[in-house]
Amino acid sequence: MYKPQPLSPIRKKFLCIFLPIWCTATLVPLIIICVLMAMHGEEKYEPHILIWTAFTLGTGLTSLGIFLPWLNRKEGLERELNRFSYLFKDPKPLTENEVKIQDESTGITYTLTQDGIAAEWEQDEQAEGQVFDEVQENQLFLPWEKAELLFASQKGFYCVHIALAVMPGANADVAEEYVHIIPMQEKLFQAICAFDLKEKLDGQWQYLFYNPKDAFKQILKKGRILEMRNKNTGKIFVDKHGNFLGDQE
């Protein structure tokens, strides 16, 4: 059963303080002007009501257009940092020698072991069969030493989507188009740590671990990490072109 999330303190203030003040500041003068119009004639007060209506509505809607996206990003940042909090803690110990992950969107089952990653998918029932009986054509195995582990991300309605992109390296004997995007989950992170793959992750992963707040903020705004900043000073030390600018404290 869906359980509604509690309102953040900022949203509470917005609903309990700002909106009532805005409604009062809009409606009370309009009511007064309408009463005066009824008592002394419409033409005299018509410019006043037009000016006040345009001012209050314009100011209020402009403020809402600026404030609400900022509030949604701020709340989304806190929520998503909490949702992915396992990335920034010591992982739970892995109790098995392999980890299986089912990607329901693609129908692929990934099996991660100490040696590498196997991807297996269902065969087309209309297919005539395998060309070679000794080769399982609906399975691909890639050893870790021949794989590159990259960072993949996107945004969606103030949510962060993070995935591990596994692709063949230059020394792999697998076609380059075999790239697998595995949505991040705690079980996958356990496997990454248990199989000593964390150091093999690319620079964007390392930045996510180094400065998660800024990394998540960029993903919520742009869908990916474009700049890397010193978490103490906020200065950029790697720009979106990959140029290193220094990491002065």
Image: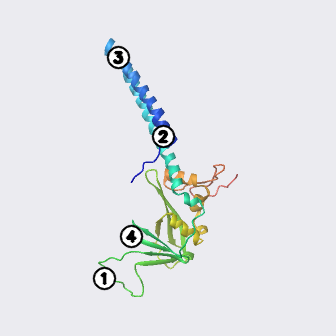
* Badge 2 vs badge 4, beta-carbon distance below 8 Å: no
Query: Which of pointers 2 and 4 lies earlier in the amino acid sequence?
Result: 2
Query: Which of pointers 3 and 2 lies earlier in the amino acid sequence?
Result: 2
Query: Which of pointers 1 and 4 lies earlier in the amino acid sequence?
Result: 4
Q: Which mark identifies residue 11? A: 2
Q: From the viewer's perspective, is the residue at label 1 or at label 4 nearer?
A: 4
Position of residue 31 relative to residue 80, above or below, is: above
Which of these two is toward me, 186 or 218? 186
Percent from the top left, x then y, of residue 121?
40, 74
- Residue under pointer 3: 35
From mark 3 to mark 2, how far is it between C-alphas?
35 Å
Q: Amino acid at mark 4?
A: Gly
Q: Secondary structure at mark 1?
A: loop
* Badge 4 vs badge 3, beta-carbon distance below 8 Å: no
* Badge 1 vs badge 4, beta-carbon distance below 8 Å: no
Q: From the viewer's perspective, is the residue at label 1 or at label 2 nearer?
A: 2
Percent from the top left, x then y, of residue 151?
53, 63
* Badge 3 vs badge 2, beta-carbon distance below 8 Å: no
> Looking at the image, can residue 242 be seen?
no
- Residue under pointer 1: 128
Q: Secondary structure at mark 3?
A: helix
From mark 4 to mark 3, how far is it between C-alphas?
67 Å
Q: From the viewer's perspective, is the residue at label 3 or at label 2 nearer?
A: 2
Query: Which of pointers 3 and 1 lies earlier in the amino acid sequence?
Result: 3
Percent from the top left, x then y, of residue 57?
40, 30
Query: Quarter of the image holding residue 48?
Result: top left
Which of these two is toward me, 180 or 171? 180
User: How many C-alpha atoms fall within 10 Å of the one at disc 1: few (<14), some, or many (≥20)?
Assistant: few
